[in-house]
Amino acid sequence: MTTQPRLLSRPQLAAVVAGNALEFYDFLVFGIFAGQIGAIFFPGQLPTRQLFLTLATAGVGFLGRPFGGLILGPLGDRIGRKPAMLFSFGLMGGSIVGLALTPSYAAIGVAAPILVVVFRLLQGFALGGEVGPTTAFLTEAAPRGRRCFYVALQFATQQAATVGAAIVGVILSNLLAPDNLNAWGWRVAMLLGAAVVPFALVMRRRLPETLEAEAARSKHRPTRKEIVLGLLTIVMLASATIATYTLIYINLFATHTLGLSTAVGFGALLVGGGCGIIFNLLGGWLSDRFGRKPLMVGGYGLLCIVGLPCFLLMSHWRTPLTLYPGTALMAALLGLGTPAIMCSLMESLPPQMRSGGSGIVYAFAIAIFGGSAQPVVAWLTDLTGSPLAPAGYMCVALALGVLAMLGIRETAPSRK
């Protein structure tokens, strides 16, 4: 029988979920300051080409995730959740600091963009290996009846990072002159996020280990049911990822498609991130009370239904009065359903497969569908000329996700 670890303090919980928060923060900072980063590392290019090269470099991080999931995730099942979490988070923090301190193209030539790509790959590798051990740890460390709430902390802190990145972007953009913003402002934004790394590493060293020695020694070959579960979960996570990055795209949707101001676009990010924090936690709490399937099917099903009308209203009345409520509603429904997906996967896997199995499934889903979501949305919008293209792509993904959800069993202990 699994021994229940001692209750974790709030600083310890914050240290556990800091990896996902830092990844989202860095991703958004990179996008917010894409123009400045492009000018530093890809000079001499046309502005559109600079932006493309910068966003492509940001997307390189997604390529490293499957390798991190394949290599570091299983380590969490063999040597323990804690060592794997320490290594992956340390590597992630180091890669972000390295990226922030990389000299410009003017200083070291072509080595500059090469270093940026290497650091993005390392960050993706670390994040791909971070998710499995961290989520397994949260599942096993949670008090009885609060597993999904603990897992929801992963997603709530992602949204908190979204809010933080948007606030930092607004403050630095308003405080610094354009030359200073180009030269070092974006570096400050990245280093602000990386500043939490030393404190989180110290707290992670004090965490208990939740993987029992017997489970670490035993070997388990995936059964046919577990393989099918993994495939269904990839579909569910793909729908979650596409919806998540479509809502992050709302910033560019507001400015490029609707013709609203940059401040309004940042406001939409803040609204979506704030609702995500609240409703991820609420979704985890409700899932512990009513089961995993009602929350994931209900949240994603409703989002599939209201997604197109929300984008239709935002496109027809191009004001914050439609943009903000539409963003809030979609972020709330997404937040309600997402934690239950990962919690259901964790509860379906044996301890000796939780870190590796979940890490691999999550990393592949994010790498394929997270890395491509925003470029696909932008391409569909340009191809069709319709502002409803993001909603169409998101709703098709959600419909497939709901079908996959209907094919899995209920895993909540009180609902089996």
Image (tube, rainbow, N blue to C red):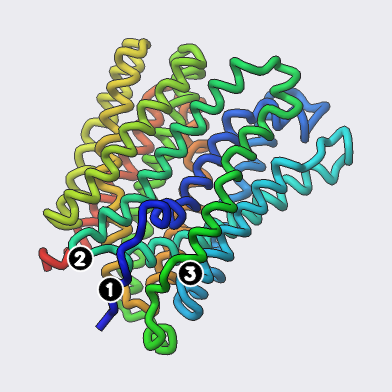
- Which residue in the protein does label 1 denote? 4
Where on the picture, by quarter, is residue 67? bottom right
- Quarter of the image containing the N terminus? bottom left
Residue 394 locus on image (x, y percent) = 35, 38
Instruction: Estimate the x, y position of residue 149 in percent, counting from the top left.
Output: 26, 53
Residue density around tag 1, few if under 14, some if 14–19, many if 20 or more, within 10 Å? few
Q: Residues within 10 Å of mark 2 (few under 14, many from 20)?
A: few
Nearest the eye: 122 or 141: 141
Left-right relation of 62 to 415: right
Q: Is residue 311 above or below residue 316?
A: below
- Amino acid type of the residue that numbered disc 2 sits on in the rendered structure: Arg
SS for dot 1: loop
Note whether 45 is above or below 25 in the view shown. Answer: above
* Residue 148 seen in the current view: yes
Q: Is residue 383 left or right of residue 397?
A: right
Labelled pair 2, 1 in contact (Cβ < 8 Å):
yes
Residue 339 x/y as whole percent: 29, 52
The residue at 40%/43% (across/down) is 242
For the image shown, how many numbered marks are present on the structure?
3
Q: Earlier in the sequence, mark 1 or mark 3?
A: 1
User: Can you identify the residue that label 3 sits on?
Assistant: 82
- The Cα atoms of the two marked residues, 2 and 1, are separated by 9 Å
Report, in whole angstroms, how far the alpha carbon at label 3 lies from the one at label 2. 21 Å
| Side (left or right) of 256 relative to 51 | left
Q: CA distance from mark 1 to mark 3?
A: 16 Å
Disc sitting over residue 144 in the figure: 2
Mark 3 or mark 2, earlier in chain: 3
Q: Residue at x 23, y 56 (%)?
A: 405
The reply to whether discs 1 and 3 touch (Cβ–Cβ < 8 Å) is no
Indicate the quadrant where residue 41 lies: top right
| Amino acid under disc 3 | Lys
